[in-house]
């Protein structure tokens, strides 16, 4: 079997066109979607992510604000900026790029963002709503994965799904989203006794581990759907995922590539959350 490859880039472009259309309609009604991004320090990967987020906003017709601080900035300065942005009615989304330098308690920073503007979906209130199956801002990466699966017509009901990774930003919300759609979900992590036992019986595997080419073809059930969330560098410094693409493609039925898979969908869903937040503001104004 040779897996069909899910083109995340093409899907992202299609969804972004719809978002740009919604943004234009909102702007015409006096509410231009606006995302504010806070970047602390000079981590090169974070700088690239922020640049792509700002560019994504601008291309979709959003207003974007960027605030950068030196690595040794006092946390109070950043908290004050978050409070100011929370109070600014023209700002619909606030994002603090992670990781933060060691003087910060990242949980406290994320909690300081108003849940109504938490377009990353990391605030405990939004995560709690997700757990309860209620409307919230969904974390962008797992939501992007759901969009990809839906775009391929993957029927999640009754599926055996295995998520590898239990982080708050990918693994846990991914598991909750799959569960809410009727999959039977197993979450694996670094303490899992026999990982291959679980992955080999899964109809769907989502790998969010952070280890290059970790999931190999012999760990995958023939015909399974495999989603690769990882962003790593291989021994030659080339971008690669958590899945060993070359061996996995001979076993899986559907597979996401790296690059060009989940990555482009993550920023797309950030834009989707921001436009949704702006829509809620407009609706509140009209009431
Ligand atoms: P974390 O490091 O927070 O979590 C990694 C998870 O993998 C942990 O739960 C860890 O288990 C588990 N793990 C580590 N080693 C093993 C192992 N040997 N066997 C089984 N499980 C293991 O990473 P993130 O969730 O933040 O990100 C995961 C990957 O996804 C990274 O490559 C990251 O760069 C990428 N990423 C990609 C995004 C995109 O847009 N495409 C967005 C966000 C992340 P334990 O909890 O026990 O330590």
Image (cartoon, grey):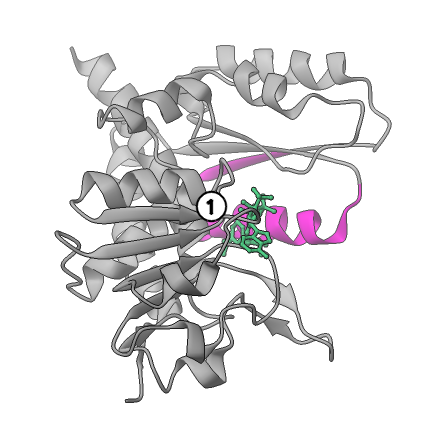
Image height of 124 relative to 161, above or below: above
List x then y, in percent, for residue 136. Answer: 30, 27
Q: Is residue 69 left or right of residue 218?
A: right
List x then y, in percent, for residue 281. Answer: 30, 20
Residue 95 visible: yes
Q: Residue furthest front?
A: 193
The secondary structure that dominates the magenta segment is helix
Image height of 259 relative to 148, above or below: below
Q: Quadrant of the N terminus?
A: bottom left
Which of the two residues, 197 or 211, is positioned nearer the viewer here? Answer: 197
Residue 26's quadrant in the figure?
top left
Q: Is residue 166 left or right of residue 75?
A: left
Q: Is residue 35 left or right of residue 254?
A: right
Which of the two residues, 98 or 174, is positioned nearer the viewer here? Answer: 174
Residue range (magenta)? 42-66
Which residue is drawn at the image coordinates 41% and 43% (left, top)? Answer: 140
Which of the two residues, 189 or 229, is positioned nearer the viewer here? Answer: 189
Q: Is residue 66 left or right of residue 282?
A: right
Residue 60 counted in the magenta span = yes
Image height of 188 relative to 196, above or below: above
Residue 104's quadrant in the figure?
top right
Which residue is drawn at the image coordinates 37% and 59% (left, top)? Answer: 198
List x then y, in percent, for residue 252. Answer: 32, 77
User: Circle 1 is placed at which residue position?
Assistant: 57
Instruction: Tell me how many marks there are.
Output: 1
Residue 60 visible: no
Q: Callout 1: helix, strand or loop? A: helix
Which residue is drawn at the image coordinates 28% and 52% (left, top)? Answer: 146
């Amino acid at each position: 079997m040779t897996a069909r490859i899910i083109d995340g880039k093409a899907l992202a472009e299609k969804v972004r066109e719809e978002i740009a259309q919604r943004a234009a309609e909102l702007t015409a009604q006096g509410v231009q979607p606006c995302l504010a991004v806070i970047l602390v320090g000079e981590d090169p990967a974070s700088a690239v992510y922020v640049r792509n987020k700002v560019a994504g906003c601008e291309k979709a017709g959003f207003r974007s604000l960027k605030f950068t601080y030196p690595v040794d900035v006092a946390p109070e300065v950043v908290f004050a900026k978050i409070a100011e942005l929370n109070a600014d009615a023209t700002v619909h989304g606030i994002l603090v790029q992670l990781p933060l330098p060691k003087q910060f308690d990242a949980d406290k920073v994320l909690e300081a963002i108003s849940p109504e503007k938490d377009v990353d979906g990391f605030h405990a209130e939004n995560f709690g709503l997700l757990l309860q199956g209620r409307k919230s801002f969904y974390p962008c990466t797992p939501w992007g994965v759901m969009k990809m699966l839906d775009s391929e017509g993957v029927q999640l009901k009754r599926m055996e799904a295995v998520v590898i990774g239990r982080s708050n930003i990918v693994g846990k919300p991914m598991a909750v989203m799959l569960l809410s759609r009727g999959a039977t979900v197993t979450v694996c992590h670094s303490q899992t006794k026999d990982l291959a036992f679980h992955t080999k019986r899964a109809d769907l595997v989502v790998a969010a581990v952070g280890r290059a080419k970790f999931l190999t073809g012999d760990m995958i059930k023939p015909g399974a759907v495999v989603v690769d969330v990882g962003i790593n560098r291989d021994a030659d410094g080339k971008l690669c995922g958590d899945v060993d693409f070359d061996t996995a493609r001979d076993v899986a039925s559907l597979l996401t590539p790296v690059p060009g898979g989940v990555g482009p969908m993550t920023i797309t869903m950030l834009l989707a959350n921001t436009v949704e937040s702006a829509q809620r503001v407009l609706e509140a104004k009209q009431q």
